[in-house]
Image (cartoon, rainbow, N blue to C red):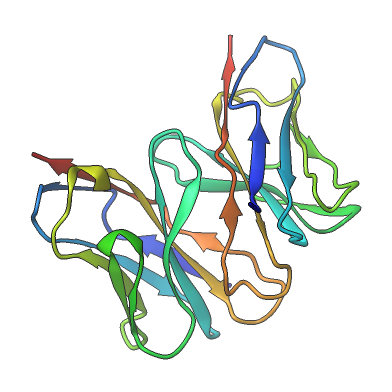
Amino acid sequence: AQSVTQLDSQVPVFEEAPVELRCNYSSSVSVYLFWYVQYPNQGLQLLLKYLSGSTLVKGINGFEAEFNKSQTSFHLRKPSVHISDTAEYFCAVSSIQGAQKLVFGQGTRLTINP
Amino acid sequence: DGGITQSPKYLFRKEGQNVTLSCEQNLNHDAMYWYRQDPGQGLRLIYYSQIVNDFQKGDIAEGYSVSREKKESFPLTVTSAQKNPTAFYLCASSNYMVLDYGYTFGSGTRLTVV
């Protein structure tokens, strides 16, 4: 079974500052990793995903994440945030083997202050 | 365009009433899921279905029921047995065997008990 821990429930930052949202996972098998974003009163939208290959993955809206197998982490970063990045962010993991469900973290609320 | 449609967007229920939330997808996905989202609690899995005419309970199935008579449709009924149904409900779908694309989410239904 897999589990996901998002280490910060809320992250406040100033506009144009860099941000890192932290995600650690636990799994006994190889995994796929995902970050989703949720704007108020909307569904979740895929930001980026790691399947294999390069450990640095780039997603939409200028976000990127780095897969660190030894640290079992998949932290999300953006070098300069905008007011429009205010949202809730979810890290998720699935086994690469078939018929597995996606396991989500508890979410991190990112608030951008002007 | 392919996607998932949830309806209605807002729903009000009186005490003791059953209500049904609709979820339809045209992505040809085998698996469909229902999640409940409450502030600060992330996503909690209610039910999921990996093939037509089959479904399994998730972590918080009590007070809910589902059916999967068609591949495209996975309606959720919130029964009067669910004591605290006010929440945001999200439907999602995925390929059954390979989660390399994660889930596709609908835009959600906000249910309020009045």
Residue B106 picture location, percent across and down: 59, 44
The residue shown at (45%, 33%) is: A41
Residue A27 makes an appearance in the image:
no
Q: Can residue A41 be seen at all in this image of the molecule?
A: yes
The quadrant of the picture occupied by the N terminus of chain A is bottom right
Q: Quadrant of the C terminus of chain A?
A: top left
Q: Is residue A67 left or right of residue B2?
A: left
Q: Which quadrant holds residue B97?
A: bottom right
Q: Residue furthest front?
A: B1
* In front of the other: B111 or B95: B95
Looking at the image, which residue is at 75% across and 14% down? B17
Q: Tell me where residue A59 sits by quadrant.
A: bottom left
Residue B41 image position (x, y, % from top left): 44, 42
Does B73 sit left or right of A35 as displayed? right
Q: Position of residue B112 (x, y in %)?
A: 56, 18
Q: How many marks?
A: 0
Q: Residue at the location (9% across, 53% down)? A: A16
Residue A48 or residue A104, whichever sits in front: A48
Residue A90 against residue B99 in the figure, above or below: above
Residue at the image point whose x is 13% and y is 59% from the top: A80
Q: Nearer the viewer, residue A75 or B4?
A: B4
Q: Height in image: B51 above or below A84?
A: below
Residue B5 drawn at (x, y percent): 66, 40
